[in-house]
Amino acid sequence: MKRLTLIIAATLLSLGQISAQKKQKSSNQNSEKMNTSKEHYTFKISEKVTRQKASFKNRYGITLSGDLYLPKNAGNNLSAIAISGPFGAVQQQSSGLYANQMAERGFVVLAFDPSYTGESGGEPRNLASPEINTEDFSAAVDFLGLQKNVDRNKIGIIGICGLGGFALNATAVDKRVKAVATTSLYDMTRVMSKGYNDSVTADQRTKTLEDLGQQRWKDAENGKPTDGPRNLPESLKGNEPQFVKEYFDYYRTPRGFHVNSVNSNGAWLITNPIAFMNMPILTYIKEISPRPMLLIAGENAHSRYFSEDIFKAANEPKELMIIPNAVHVDLYDIADVIPFDKLESFFRANLK
């Protein structure tokens, strides 16, 4: 089962690395007590924005939960954006921070938890699905298009990290989406089936699938799915790989901790990779054209190659923006690193 454990560990890929200049900030936060309230947000809402709870169903009948961010006194016929991610995070973390910033700039924005996670419905818990998580974005578009102050012909989406791949997949199939942007993109189907930098061999893949099949027998005998290894430990021993320490520095400290987040506080099901192993979600990436695509990645991000490869594969109009000196997790919550002005100009130009 060792290889299976490695595949489960790949579900941490939404996590990434933290730049050296920010480590002092988070290390200072480590001495603070983490807020374990479900109502806790990891950022402060803007005085120019209001936030209200949102609830809507996807095509599979799963009730999704989100927060709707509205610019104060903005009027009608507004452009709107649906945001989700990172993979294993919740709306009180990065997606909410992005929504707050974009609403401050005049957009109606929905930050939502994907199916089976956070405040959204779906059983069993802590499960991901390439199909259903793609559908979640289209359901968010449904919801936004029904808002009286939104022009349904001016809706875009932003996907952060692992939800970036689903955002692109949703845009390819859902022609109502007028523009799409991703930050710190991950293609979850690629990395879970092929490993980082496509390093998994055919024999390793076969062994993983055999292990997953055996796990299914165990789950069937027990009558319920089994949790995989916890995403992050309660504390570090000091001998962990550097990437685990960096993940910990965001999700397991006051900087980014949220009790509902799988990455902060739980584990994916051990059979979670099954649906990802033979379902490449970005096969039809060229069909996003002629609608515009913006891919944003850190210069030093371990995940940078995902954005670069999608940029090469996609048709125009497309843009790849590399943030100097930034790494993967910098684009989760560091407001002066995330190019919000660029996101504003991109959507303002293309949601019209």
Image (cartoon, helix red, strand yellow):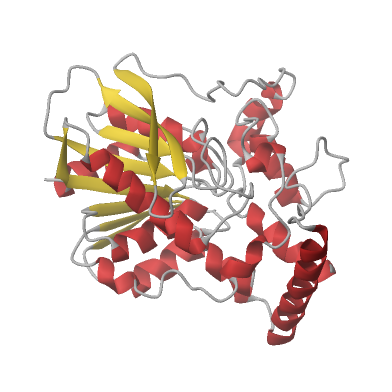
Q: Which quadrant of the figure contains the C terminus?
A: top left
Residue at horizontal 30 percent and vertical 53 percent from the top: 180
Observer-nearest of 82 and 345? 82
> Left or right: 213 with respect to 128?
right
Observer-nearest of 331 and 116? 116
* Relative image position of residue 307 (x, y in whole percent): 43, 62
> Left or right: 169 with respect to 195?
left
Count of numbered badges drawn on the protein: 0
Q: Is residue 299 visible?
A: no
Observer-nearest of 20 and 313? 313
Q: Quadrant of residue 190?
A: bottom right
* Relative image position of residue 13 (x, y in whole percent): 61, 55
Observer-nearest of 302 and 289? 289
Q: Is residue 228 visible?
A: yes
* Relative image position of residue 273 (x, y in whole percent): 64, 65
Q: Quadrant of residue 258?
A: top right
* Relative image position of residue 123 (x, y in whole percent): 60, 49
Q: Is residue 102 above or below residue 311?
A: above
Residue at horizontal 26 percent and vertical 39 percent from the top: 144
Residue at the limit of the structure toward the top, as seen here: 47
Q: Is residue 49 above or below residue 145?
A: above
Q: Which quadrant of the figure contains the N terminus?
A: bottom right
Q: Quadrant of residue 171?
A: bottom left
Residue at horizontal 58 percent and vertical 68 percent from the top: 275
Q: Is residue 150 above or below residue 34?
A: below
> Left or right: 135 with respect to 227?
left
Residue at horizontal 16 percent and vertical 30 percent from the top: 149
